[in-house]
Amino acid sequence: MTNDITSATRLAPPIGGFEEIDGRRVFVHRSGSGGPAVVFLPGASAVGLDYFGVQQQVSQFTTAVVYDRGGTGYSDSLALPRTAAAVATELRELLRAQNVTAPYVLAAHSLGGCYAHRFAQLYPQDVAGLVCLDVLHRDWDEFMPPTASLAAIEQMGPDPEQLRKMRPALREIHAELLADYPEHIRQPLIDAKVSDEWMRVGIAERATLTDLASELRAGPNIPDVPVVALTVVGSDPTQQTLTSPEMNDAKTRMDAALVSGVSHGEQRILSDTLHHRLCFDRPDAVVQAIRDVVDRVAPH
């Protein structure tokens, strides 16, 4: 046992394990077999196991991998935020260390979309297809109203003190979202998600969205691979700025432009869920999108 308090009190994942990358432990859980492998890239404040439900379904027809970026979730602590290049490089090293054969279908949610794009810029030969789950996009500010610009979103999140006050409500939200999870995964995950450390990480990862977009704009467009984009346009009275009709119209146009940039791109609009609830409310739509991209990838 180490004397380093952070290591000693690191939360142990209820499933999955670790791969050592650059001297740090990175959490990973894979299931299924065959290819192309599907790799989930979590959103901010989300972790790999938030996608466990859809991973289990995807693993019925191919290899499915969930993981926590360095500095988030069950992975070892690391100064945040990081560049998209650092995150993409880490993911490639993780997949290689796990002997997951490239090319991959990247299933990215929210902020994970920026990291998937950077991965595709750096390693286009390793990307077979993309599933964009209501993703953040490098051209966000070109489409969105000023009230929902990346700079505005950076300022929007609650501070640590507000989050602590929200903890009971957040616990209820996570308990409801994870209601169908096996209990041995569900309860430890709920406890971890309302821990001070995990809540702080969610704030830190959102701190430099404008820098991330600039980093991506300096590189190429996504490669010409099959893409399905799920655009969520549900309305949430508690999040009026981010779910207004104007905002949803902007998101719809943004994702339409994204899929029009490739030969085999398709947009699917979902009005019966919200951004953070997508994989819990509509796992059927998420799994279908992934299956369709996997099917469209030519055999390698």
Image (spheres, helix red, strand yellow):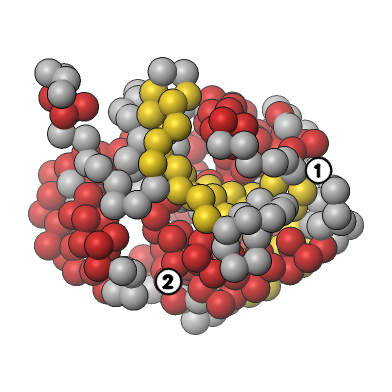
Quadrant of residue 100 in the image?
top right
- Look at the image and tell me whether residue 38 can be seen: yes
Residue situated in front as seen by the camera: 285 or 272: 285
Query: Which label belongs to residue 280?
Result: 2
Quadrant of residue 81 in the image?
top left
Judged left or right of residue 260, residue 212 is: left
Q: Are marks 2 and 1 in contact (CB under 8 Å)?
A: no
State the image coordinates of residue 194 (x, y, percent, origin top left): 19, 52
State the image coordinates of residue 240 (x, y, percent, origin top left): 39, 68
| Mark 1 residue type | Pro
> Which one is earlier in the sequence, the residue at label 2 or at label 1?
1
Q: Which residue appears at 21% of the width and 55% of the height?
A: 188
- Say above or below: 174 vs 70: below
Going by the picture, which residue comes out furthest to the bottom? 272
Q: Which residue appears at 40% of the width and 58% of the height?
A: 50
Q: Which residue is mark 1?
A: 223
Judged left or right of residue 112, residue 182 is: left
Q: Which residue appears at 49% of the width and 81% of the height?
A: 272
| Mark 2 residue type | Phe
State the image coordinates of residue 120 (x, y, percent, origin top left): 71, 38
Quick one: label 1, few (<14), some, or many (20+) residues within 10 Å? many
Q: Which residue appears at 57% of the width and 58% of the height?
A: 32
User: For the residue labelled by badge 2, is the local secondary structure a helix, a strand or a loop?
Assistant: helix
- Say above or below: 164 vs 186: above
State the image coordinates of residue 199 (x, y, percent, origin top left): 25, 45
- Look at the image and tell me whether residue 258 can be seen: no
Query: Which label belongs to residue 181?
Result: none
Quick one: label 2, few (<14), some, or many (20+) residues within 10 Å? many
- Say above or below: 299 vs 83: below
Residue situated in front as seen by the camera: 225 or 255: 225
Judged left or right of residue 126, residue 1 is: left
